[in-house]
Image: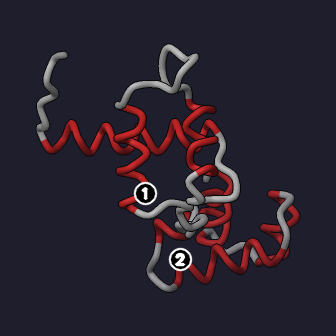
Amino acid sequence: MITRARILTKLAKGHSNQEVCQALDVTLPTVLKIRKRFVEGRLQAALGELPRPGSKPKLDAKQAAMITAIACSKAPDGHDHWTLRLLGSKIVELGFAQSYSHEGVRQLLKKRTQAVAKAGVVHRKS
């Protein structure tokens, strides 16, 4: 972001594209891209990153809800509780995905519990 601001500052002071490239050790396409975004009236786009689409979720809402319910159920025999890796294996076993990492399970459960908390759901004490 700082380099982008410096590019815009030098351009505003009347420096040529080549002078900006040499002074800030950036490529010409970079300077041209920043200039174009600024000229189009998109200062925020010129200074920051554009949003990136990311990958599509592996699970749909129903599948995510089912995994959340499973995580809240009794653990399989031989286990005290559901671990993230066990839940990842369960996702594969149910055929929801060919693979699912424990980190993916953690993120899924974190999102789901935040949504439940926002909805004001009250859990019964067992």
* Nearer to us in this view, 69 or 33: 69
Tell me what residue is drawn at x 11 percent, y 31 percent: 122
Is 64 rendered above or below residue 70? below
Provide residue 6's location: percent of width, then percent of height: 65, 57
Q: Nearer the viewer, residue 65 or 80?
A: 80
Residue appearing at x 83%, y 76% in the figure: 28
Query: Viewed as shown, does residue 29 lie left or right of 10?
Result: right
Q: Is residue 116 left or right of residue 66?
A: left
Q: In the rendered view, would you say 119 is above or below 122?
A: below
| Label 2 Cα crowd, 10 Å radius (few <14 / some 14-19 / many 20+) | some
Question: What is the secondary structure assignment of the residue under circle 1?
Answer: helix
Please provide percent x and percent y for residue 10. 67, 65
Residue 37 lies, with reference to residue 65, above or below; the image says below
Q: Distance from label 1 to label 2 (Cα)?
A: 43 Å
Q: Which mark is residue 42?
A: none
Provide the secondary structure element on which disc 2 rests: helix
Screen quadrant of the C terminus: top left
State the residue lying farthest toward the front.
77
Q: Amino acid at mark 1?
A: Gln
Residues at marks 1 and 2 touching, judged by CB atoms closer than 8 Å: no
Tell me: residue 89, above or below residue 76: below
| Amino acid type, callout 2 | Phe
Q: Which dot, 1 or 2, sits closer to the camera?
A: 1
Measured as percent of width and height from the top left, residue 95 is found at 60, 59
**Residue 43 appears left or right of 62:** right
Q: Which comes sooner in the sequence, label 1 or label 2? A: 2
Residue 63's mark? 1
Residue occupying image coordinates x 64% and y 48%: 100
Q: What residue is shown at x 40% (from left), y 38% (from top)?
A: 70
Q: Specify how the rendered protein is coloured.
A: secondary structure
Judging by the rendered image, the residue that carries numbered circle 2 is 38
